[in-house]
């Protein structure tokens, strides 16, 4: 097991739960037992110790693993036809029948940004917590999920926060500019200055000790601390040339977590023997996993790291050799359906709760559903990402209502809808809705599903 995070821990727990009696080695890189990352930004100031997964999930990794090495990362992989060998940073070699790659992701830090910090580990959170104080000049580069979460927490603690975003709105890449422009107003309301539409060129320490953020339009911002929150990518550099990686550095796996095909027959990584490939599995942020509705889904979802290892381990142990088959094939074979989870992201940012199910595409048509102001002073709303732009033949219900196919649902400050929408989206066929009903805020979204 390579990686002592959520996906690694869940994989080890699944191995034992499904009765695997053999030896397990778990390699970690941070020197810490598994902990949860989402609170690092959301509860940056209120949670001063990591949220240990041993407590949160009641899984004690020490009792499940024979050889636990929390600070000896894998540096080389030798996938062979008979066995797979992992070389570690300390120079030892671990040989096994199979390897599960659960090494997660690492934050992107562009060249020339040497004076910027990142927020990815418990150590990063501790360092940021130490300096966060009223009056601190904090520049956050990137108005994505993590940038927005930290901006809200820091502004709430009295810091002077500026967020610089290259796109024209917050979360534009993830949610599109139409929805992003709705989120922009939250920054002002939370006392955060938002600068959009201009990329950052460099983040360097100035002669007077300030950190200087140079923008592409020639402006310069002086700060005490600069946080780069411009995304993460799989921590797979050590596998380059050994395994086929996709453009982001992810491992393309099927629904069960088994490595898929080859990147290119001309690359050595693409010429691995099938018996060697068979020994390699990937879960969590390391993987780009095939989903029957959403296609290849890149890692980065906490819920996938929590849920996917169970199926992967059942396939690895041979308990469910048809784990990757589509549901209709499984039912023909008399097999139980595999539980399906739509990609899910949750966020608490600038005083608002967000839940995103599915994968929005920039080509989707977005339909807004505005609710009435709630008791907590927030107004619930939802954005439905619809494939109808590609629907040349307009379909209607017998009542004459428009039918739309939903690719994603973003729920904002709508806690009452979350469980029902999760259930609607966790299916093996695209969700079809009665759009006229769905846009009526007096109708529950679940009652608009067809
Ligand atoms: C600040 C923050 C907030 C987040 N908030 C949300 C959220 O609100 N919602 C959401 O869905 N997701 C969120 N995420 C993403 C979520 O935390 C990840 O999807 C999840 O942690 C993935 O689990 P994982 O086990 O695959 O990877 P990780 O949790 O990254 O664990 C992988 C572990 O492997 C170790 N490792 C790396 N390389 C090696 C190696 N070569 N050998 C051995 N070990 C190695 C790493 O150090 C790490 O400890 C957030 C992430 C961060 C950083």
Image (cartoon, rainbow, N blue to C red):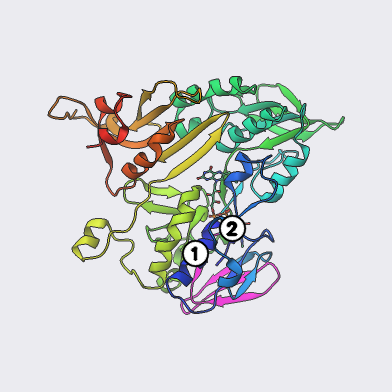
96 on left or right of 444: right
Which mark is on residue 167? none
Q: Which residue is mark 1?
A: 11
Residue 312 against residue 407 in the figure, above or below: below
The tag earlier along the polypeptide, 1 or 2, is 1
Residue 243 at what x, y percent from top left? 50, 62
Q: How many marks?
A: 2
Q: What residue sits 40% from the left and 38% below the top?
A: 418
160 on left or right of 107: right
Residue 196 against residue 240 in the figure, above or below: above
Residue 95 falls inside the magenta stretch: yes
Q: Which residue is mark 2?
A: 55
Q: What residue sits 60% from the left and 19% below the top?
A: 188
The residue carrying pointer 2 sits among few (fewer than 14), some (14 to 19) or many (20 or more) residues within 10 Å by Cα, namely few
Q: Nearer the viewer, residue 416 or 319?
A: 416
Ligand 1 within 8 Å of the CB at mark 1: no
Residue 199 falls inside the magenta stretch: no
Residue 408 at what x, y percent from top left? 37, 37
The quadrant of the image that shows the C terminus is top left
Spatial CA distance of label 1 from label 2 is: 17 Å
The quadrant of the image that shows the N terminus is bottom right
Q: Is residue 339 visible?
A: yes
Q: Nearer the viewer, residue 235 or 293?
A: 293
- In magenta, the rendered stretch is 77-102
């Amino acid at each position: 097991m390579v990686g002592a995070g959520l996906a690694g821990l869940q994989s080890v727990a699944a191995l034992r739960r499904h009765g695997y009696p053999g030896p397990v080695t778990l390699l970690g890189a941070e020197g810490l037992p598994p902990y949860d990352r989402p609170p690092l930004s959301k509860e940056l100031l209120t949670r001063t110790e990591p949220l240990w997964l041993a407590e949160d999930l009641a899984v004690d990794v020490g009792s499940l693993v024979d050889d636990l090495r929390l600070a000896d990362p894998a540096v080389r992989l030798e996938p062979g036809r008979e066995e797979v060998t992992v070389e570690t940073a300390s120079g030892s070699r671990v040989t096994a029948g199979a390897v599960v790659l659960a090494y997660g992701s690492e934050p992107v830090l562009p060249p020339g940004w040497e004076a910027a910090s990142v927020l990815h580990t418990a150590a990063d959170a501790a360092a940021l917590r130490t300096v966060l104080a009223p009056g601190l000049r904090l520049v956050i580069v990137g108005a994505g999920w993590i940038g927005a979460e930290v901006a809200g927490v820091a502004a709430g603690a009295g810091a002077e926060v500026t967020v610089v975003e290259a796109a024209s709105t917050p979360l534009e890449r993830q949610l599109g500019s139409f929805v992003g422009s709705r989120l922009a107003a939250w920054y002002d309301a939370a006392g955060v200055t938002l600068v959009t539409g201009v990329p950052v060129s460099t983040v360097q320490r100035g002669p007077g000790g300030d950190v200087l953020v140079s923008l592409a339009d020639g402006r310069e911002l002086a700060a005490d601390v600069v946080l780069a929150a411009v995304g993460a990518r799989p921590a797979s550099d050590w596998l380059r040339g050994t395994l086929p990686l996709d453009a982001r550095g992810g491992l393309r796996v099927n629904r069960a977590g088994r490595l898929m095909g080859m990147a290119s027959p001309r690359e050595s990584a693409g010429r691995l023997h099938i018996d060697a490939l068979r020994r390699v599995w990937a879960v969590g942020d390391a993987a780009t996993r095939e989903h029957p509705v959403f296609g290849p889904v890149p890692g980065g979802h906490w819920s996938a790291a929590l849920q996917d290892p169970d199926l992967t381990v059942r396939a690895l142990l041979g308990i469910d050799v048809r784990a990757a088959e589509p549901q209709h094939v499984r039912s023909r074979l008399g097999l139980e359906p595999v539980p399906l989870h739509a990609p899910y992201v949750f966020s608490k940012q600038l005083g608002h709760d967000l839940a995103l199910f599915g994968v929005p595409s920039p080509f989707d048509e977005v339909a807004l559903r505005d609710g009435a102001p709630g008791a907590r002073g927030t107004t619930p709303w939802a954005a439905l990402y619809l494939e109808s732009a590609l629907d040349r033949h307009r379909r209607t219900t017998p009542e004459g209502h428009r039918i739309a196919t939903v690719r994603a649902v973003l729920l904002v400050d709508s806690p009452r809808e979350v469980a029902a929408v999760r259930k609607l989206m966790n299916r093996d066929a695209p969700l079809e809705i009665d759009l006229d009903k769905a846009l009526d805020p007096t109708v529950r979204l679940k009652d608009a599903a067809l």
